[in-house]
Amino acid sequence: MCIDEVTAVMQDMTKESDQQNDFLSENNVQKDFTAEDLCILKAMFLELEKAIDSIELKNRNEGDTFPGGYIFELLEKIEVIIFTFK
């Protein structure tokens, strides 16, 4: 779902850049994300989706439960940098 949302924002950015002239636009506002940022974010979400899909469930009908730290293992697989504070 979030991959679709990032894609939609990317498409909106493309439409906006096609429709406006930076010198004449009244809505010339600094964006929170660049197109490159969105491409990186989409790639990360795709890798996360792939990692989640690769999880083998022992109990397919009811699902499985994993320890809380498992999320860090999953994020490590897709090489997301995690900062922890002690």
Image (spheres, rainbow, N blue to C red):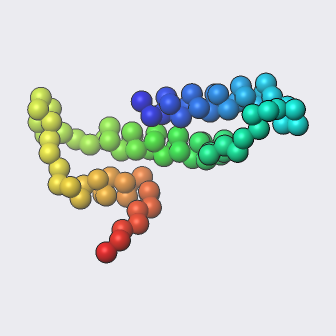
How far from the left and from the top, in percent, is residue 69?
23, 59
Quarter-wise, where is residue 9 in the image?
top right
Q: Classify residue 30 as left or right of residue 49.
A: right
The correct choice, above or below, for 51 with respect to 72 in the image is above
* Quadrant position of the C terminus in the picture: bottom left
Q: Classify residue 40 as left or right of residue 25.
A: left
Depth check: give the residue in front, 30 or 40: 30
Quarter-wise, where is residue 39 in the image?
top right
In percent of the image, x 50 and y 31: which residue is there?
5
Q: Classify residue 20 as left or right of residue 77.
A: right
Quick one: which residue is furthest to the front in this view? 26
How far from the left and from the top, in percent, is residue 71?
29, 53
How far from the left and from the top, in percent, is residue 14?
70, 30
Quick one: which residue is furthest to the right in this view? 23
The correct choice, above or below, for 76 with respect to 43 in the image is below
* Quadrant position of the N terminus in the picture: top left
How far from the left and from the top, in percent, is residue 31?
66, 43
In percent of the image, x 64 and y 28: which residue is there?
11
In percent of the image, x 48 and y 33: which residue is there?
3
Depth check: give the residue in front, 76 or 29: 29
In percent of the image, x 57 and y 47: which residue is there?
40
| Tally of marks | 0
